[in-house]
């Protein structure tokens, strides 16, 4: 469809459901096009059209994506992996110049989301409760002595995703060892509470959050939610609204939150579809439709909290078989 709403999903990997949801919403309106650097990315084969592209880090990668957009009259583009979000945000104008809308927050916002310490400082400075963090280990030791924080704590890279290289440590010796082996580490308070996730869409026309879906995480696997249950709490919705407003986020956002003694703390903000998005979708929170509405020039109405509570999601394995 050359005059339809053609959507390009980059680095689709195993996110088959997202491709399926967009296909359903775009049926008769446009095509879903997917890319990946591996021909064994199963989500490619759900799309109406797919391309195997170089690795994101390869020279000329951006030109390949821009030419796919041009040749296929792509109306909007989004990525499902963290490293690529900065690339799209940085080259927003290159895409806009050829008539393609990147569904992404501004570059400085994206970069702050991926710099956990910068995000901590911003939230802390704006009165939004967040997880206590340190990049200066000496300052941390002083806080331990003062009784402001106790072991165990997490040591993690300042920038990183999918729970890679995160260690729980219980002593100064372990912290010293970690800091001597790796650069760019931070120390983060261990939140011994209930973990929540939020799927949020900020309308790209009005700039207002139009849907917030929150779930309690029951089981995690390599940083992704494996089992969860839908919940609603006005207090949590208000916290997320003030976060969105202060950080000036746009489009699709995935937020990790902890609750301890009835208080909520923002843990992480990812400016993309979260791995647990299908839970929101199957509960009637249709962010894919909201994106299409925006691409058609329609502002979405506020549907915050319009979903059922106590709906459980359980992930299980599926297979894709293709003959080469």
Image (cartoon, rainbow, N blue to C red):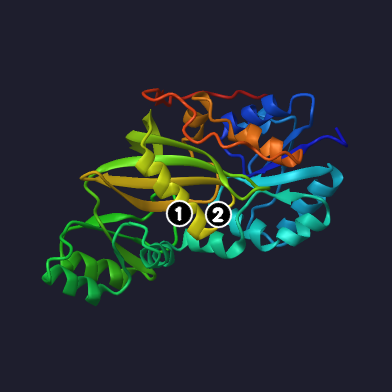
What residue do we see at 11% from left, 71% from top?
A: 145
Q: Quadrant of the N terminus?
A: top right
Residue 54 spot, x, y in % from top left: 69, 51
Secondary element under disc 2, as helix, strand or loop, is loop
Image position of 98 (left or right of 40) = right
Residue 324 appears in the rendering = no
252 shown above or below 184: above
Asked whether the residues under the numbered discs 1 and 2 touch, taking CB atoms below 8 Å apart as contact, a structural biologist would say yes
What residue do we see at 54% from left, 52% from top?
A: 82
Image position of 125 (left or right of 260) = right
Residue 56 appears in the rendering = yes
Secondary element under disc 1, as helix, strand or loop, is helix
What residue do we see at 88% from left, 36% from top?
A: 2
Q: Residue beneath label 2, please?
A: 249
157 shown above or below 262: below
Q: Kindly indicate the quadrant of the structure image that contains residue 24.
A: top right
Residue 63 spot, x, y in % from top left: 77, 57
Circle on res. 48: none
Q: Residue beneath label 1, please?
A: 243
38 shown above or below 32: below
Residue 298 spot, x, y in % from top left: 72, 38
Distance Cα–Cα, label 1 vs label 2: 8 Å
Which of the two residues, 233 or 5, is positioned nearer the viewer here? 233
**Of callouts 1 and 2, the N-terminal one:** 1
Image position of 21 (left or right of 126) = right
Crowd rating for badge 1 (residues with CA inside 10 Å; few <14, some 14–19, many 20+): many
């Amino acid at each position: 469809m050359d005059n339809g709403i053609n959507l390009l999903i980059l680095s689709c990997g195993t996110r088959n459901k997202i491709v399926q949801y967009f296909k359903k919403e775009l049926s008769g309106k446009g095509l879903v096009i997917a890319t990946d650097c591996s021909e064994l990315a199963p989500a490619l084969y759900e799309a109406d059209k797919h391309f195997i592209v170089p690795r994101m880090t390869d020279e000329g990668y951006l030109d390949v994506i821009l030419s796919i957009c041009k040749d296929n009259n792509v109306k909007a583009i989004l990525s499902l992996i963290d490293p690529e979000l900065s690339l799209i945000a940085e080259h927003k104008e290159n895409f806009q110049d050829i008539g393609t809308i990147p569904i992404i927050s501004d570059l400085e916002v994206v970069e702050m989301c991926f710099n956990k310490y910068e995000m901590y400082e911003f939230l802390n400075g704006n009165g939004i409760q967040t997880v206590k963090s340190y990049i200066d280990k000496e300052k941390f030791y002083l806080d331990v002595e003062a009784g402001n924080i106790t072991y165990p704590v997490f040591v993690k890279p300042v920038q990183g995703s999918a729970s890679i290289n995160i260690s729980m440590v219980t002593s100064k010796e372990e912290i010293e060892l970690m800091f001597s082996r790796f650069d760019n580490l931070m120390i983060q308070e261990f939140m011994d509470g209930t973990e929540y996730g939020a799927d949020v869409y900020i309308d790209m026309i009005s700039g207002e959050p139009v849907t917030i879906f929150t779930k309690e995480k029951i089981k995690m696997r390599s940083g992704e939610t494996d089992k969860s249950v839908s919940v609603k709490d006005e207090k949590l919705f208000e916290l997320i609204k003030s976060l969105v407003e202060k950080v000036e986020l746009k489009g699709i956002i995935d937020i990790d939150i902890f609750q301890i003694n009835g208080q909520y703390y923002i843990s992480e903000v990812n400016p993309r579809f979260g791995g647990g998005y299908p839970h929101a979708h199957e509960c009637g929170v249709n962010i894919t439709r909201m994106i299409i509405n925006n691409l058609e020039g329609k502002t979405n109405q506020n549907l915050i909290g319009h979903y059922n509570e106590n709906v459980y999601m359980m992930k299980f394995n599926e297979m894709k078989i293709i003959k080469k």
